[in-house]
Image (cartoon, rainbow, N blue to C red):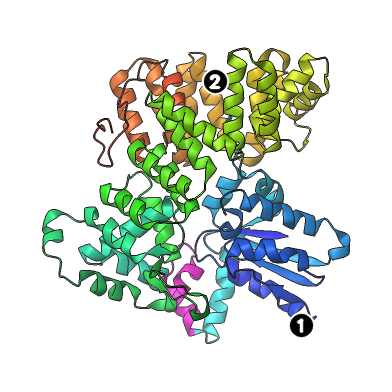
Amino acid sequence: MAVLVGGSSTGKTRACWEAIQPLARQGWRLWHPYDPSYWEATLEGIERVEPHTVLWLNEAQRYFGAGQERGGRIASAIRSLLSTPARGPVLVLATLWPNFDNEYAASPSAGEEDPHASVRDLLSRRRITLADGFDEDALKEARDLAAAGDRHLAHALAHAREGRLTQQLAGAPELVRRYLSAAPEGKAVLHAAMDARRLCAGLALPVRFLEQAAEDYLGDDDFDILADDWLEQTLGALGRSGHGNFAPLRRIRPRSTRTTAGDTTTLRLADYLEERGRQERSRLCPPESFWHAAHLHVIDPDDLAKLAREAYSRLRLRWAERLWRKAAEAGDTTALTRVAQIREELGDSAEAEVLWQEAATAGNGEALSHLARGREEVGEVVEAERLYRLAAAAGHGRARAWLIKRQEDAGDATARARFNALAAGSGDTVDLVAVETYLHLSLQQVDMPAWARYLTARDAANGDSEARAWLIEEAVKTGDFAEAERLLEMLADSGDTETLSRLQWRWGVTGDRAEAERRIRIAADAGAVESRIEWAKWNLGELESLWPYGLEPDGTPSEQW
């Protein structure tokens, strides 16, 4: 298996295609699972893969990012395929954008679920990172080819910057030109599409969603003078193909044999503009019309849950709850637990308990673990253990950690040995969520210097910003603000603005309330507030009452809803 990681239009797909041509001449088959959907086709067909097959996972986030644990099931199925000699030889080729690769590689915080554990294990040591541009040796070879008569390459060499030939050849500069020169209504639609994709909505964006979402991206004057058929004119202009046969916003034509009554027209944003939107709009919160349109027109429960999570991380709690409720109505039990958490934070413990019970009855591991903690707190240990066992069977890491701690208290020291071995960097494959939960349950029994060495080694080996973030948090907790500031400056120099913004909102522990509020608001707009509970904890409760009902999309404090 090889996973090519690189930005849009860097040549990932072409490189894979060129690489397998010798196999085609030897009679190998290629399987690209996509019908009726990427994840369904993979899970239904992977058991039928025969030797001498190339499994083609272009844009692998379509497979590994499938919600409700489907991505993890796909990763596990591929590992099984690769580790069964009788089924080979097979070759798995995948392409990934860096932001998705970083998402799958990141370890969760203590107590959080780990939805990408199987994907992270699968991708480990199988990545090939592509540079954004070609080096001088490659450019010399390209110039020789251009001199021999390749006019397209000659044009790309004349206009590309920093060796970015593939992007030039793919028409990226023309896409950017059309985006920058678009009419206000065209730019509003593109900004709505950019925000939808960077906030994890699906590739297929409903036209009615974009139409309504775009409204608040326009000023009053531009909105008032819109023609009655402004949407048709705008989509026509944005849908015309340019260089490389790309359009800024192209209609997704449904296959006639797979359409059903009630299907709506959907559009896809050009990859290069999507990536540009992630970069230039990363610190902006979408306006009111965006969230209203998402609630009305997004129907996929996975997309609803992802958008809800993004709203929550921006302290837009009203919209987070509405989106999670809609996802829960579609059968997403995890969304039920998220609504329950919000109701708890708002002081509505009665409704929260009803929601926790409903999710637990549906077999949700997090809800079962939550109820178990409640029973444990009132001394009902037998019932707590029963619920923890149900939660552990459902795959919940915190429940597994609790059971291991109980076994250790009963005299079984094997769990402690396993966790200390992991802390020392033995490479054992275990659930890191369970490990970190175990640390919180039993800090005095864990070799913390070994755990710190493990984190430091992980940082050094992989450039893992999470390890650096952990060190900053430790410095803040111990009052060493000078060291924390030094590490923050290093983080800023590294270009990791996401982790930087996520850490800055915790700065209220310095006692500067005004500065803490300013940083929290900036972090909220960027989607960098991890949780209200963490917010209160890291600010020693000083800011717990700030914006008790969250923020509106325009940044003003929300009224009670």
Q: Amino acid at mark 1?
A: Arg
Residue that mark 1 sits on: 25
Residue 437 part of the magenta segment:
no
Residue that mark 2 sits on: 474
- Kind of element beneath mark 1: helix
Q: Quadrant of the N terminus?
A: bottom right
Do the numbered discs 1 and 2 sit on residues whose CB atoms are within 8 Å?
no
Q: Which residues are magenta?
A: 151-171
Identify the main secondary structure in magenta: helix
- Of residue 241 and residue 465, the one placed in the foreground of this image is 241
In this rendering, the answer to whether 116 lies above or below 354 is below
Q: Amino acid at mark 2?
A: Glu
- For residue 133, say whether it is visible: yes
In this rendering, the answer to whether 407 lies above or below 521 is above
> For residue 452, which numbered disc appears in the image?
none
Q: Write down the quadrant of residue 253 in the picture.
A: bottom left
Q: Write down the quadrant of residue 504 in the picture.
A: top left
Q: Is residue 360 left or right of residue 81?
A: left
Locate residue 164, reporting x and y percent: 48, 65
